[in-house]
Image (cartoon, rainbow, N blue to C red):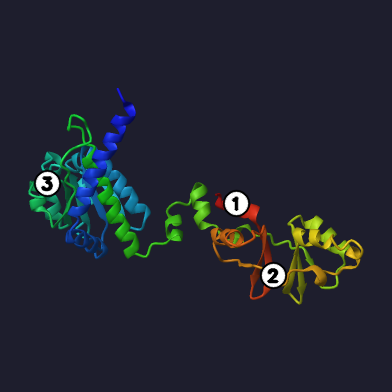
Amino acid sequence: MDVKKIAQELFDKEICELEKVKNKISDSLEVVVNLILNSKGKVVITGIGKSGIIGKKIAATFASTGTHAVFMNAAEGLHGDLGIISKDDVVIAISNSGNSDEVLSIIPSIKKIGAVLVAMTGNPNSGLGKLSNAILNVGVEQEGCPLNLAPMSSTTSTLVMGDALATVLIKARNFKPENFAVYHPGGSLGRRLLMRVKDVMHKDLPIVDLNSDMDKIIMTMTKKRLGVVCIVEKDRLLGIITEGDIRRALKMKDKFFSLKAEDIMTKDYTYAVQDIMALEALELMENRESQISVLPVLEEKKVVGVVRIHDLLNVVGK
């Protein structure tokens, strides 16, 4: 048995079916998008069996990208869970055949409640299709299953249609990474998207003045251990001295210890402001001809902190 060949054939089948479903996308998608955007309620996704499992994932994607959504198992809907639905809601019912008993059985109640009904089905002419306000056609010609029985291509096409709908809604709502982060505050993802420079910057600053000598510069840098010294006059940052600046100054061995801060400082420095995202600050450091490892943080030309690349990597990651 050629395992690799069998697996590749499955991929080919499902990709082929997805292409067909893509070509079936019609104005109905825009209708559904507008129904959701104009709704005063939430999106309730329902289904049974494997369609229900796909529905749970679609509802989770909606909920994490700015569309208030929940999943209701169609069988549980028959026993009280229809109370989840209100007249302002949009209900997306998933059924490949469009004739699932549990799904069809709850439609009269959905209609009585007054919610809008959208069918996500492979059979637009089914009972579900005929009773719906709009239809998203996810019909496939063959399943990936070699017996053409187990739902494979059909569940894949339903999932991708759900992703397509979520993608349009994300763009329509102008949903941003920081919005996404609000729904994912835990773990590395939350830190990556929520942390700002002010949350990680060092406020106990290594400060010297223009006339500070090398002894003071080196002692200040060593004491603060941030890899930088800020040259400040009347709270205004005039320049910075990094470990790299000191190494370059060492080439002037004969006069190294007679140098002052103003002689070796970098006046044209890159800086961050404290309210930008940590990820943006990291990009400032890396997206340049020569990478830098430390940034002064300014507020109206006043230095308020220092942030190192290590601080950013700890919260943003790579």
* Residue 62 percent coordinates (x, y): 32, 53
* Residue 239 percent coordinates (x, y): 74, 71
Question: For the residues marked 3 and 1, what is the alpha-carbon distance in whole angstroms?
Answer: 50 Å
Q: Which residue is mark 3?
A: 123
Question: For the residues marked 2 and 1, what is the alpha-carbon distance in whole angstroms?
Answer: 22 Å
**Is label 2 in a helix, a strand or a loop?**
strand
Left or right position of 137 against 171: left
Badge 1, how many Cα within 10 Å: few under 14, some, many 20+? some
Choose the circle earlier in sequence order: 3 or 1. 3
Residue 52: in sight, yes or no?
Answer: no
Three-letter residue code for mark 1: Leu
Tell me what residue is drawn at x 61 percent, y 60 percent: 285
Asked if residue 22 is positioned above or below residue 37 in the image, the reply reads above
Badge 2, how many Cα within 10 Å: few under 14, some, many 20+? many
Choose the circle earlier in sequence order: 2 or 3. 3
**Is label 3 in a helix, a strand or a loop?**
loop
Q: Which mark is residue 27?
A: none
Q: Which residue is mark 2?
A: 303
**Is label 1 in a helix, a strand or a loop?**
helix
The quarter of the picture where residue 222 lies is bottom right
Tell me what residue is drawn at x 45 percent, y 55 percent: 181
Mark 2 vs mark 1: give the one in front.
Answer: 1
Q: Which residue is mark 1?
A: 313
Tell me what residue is drawn at x 31 percent, y 25 percent: 2
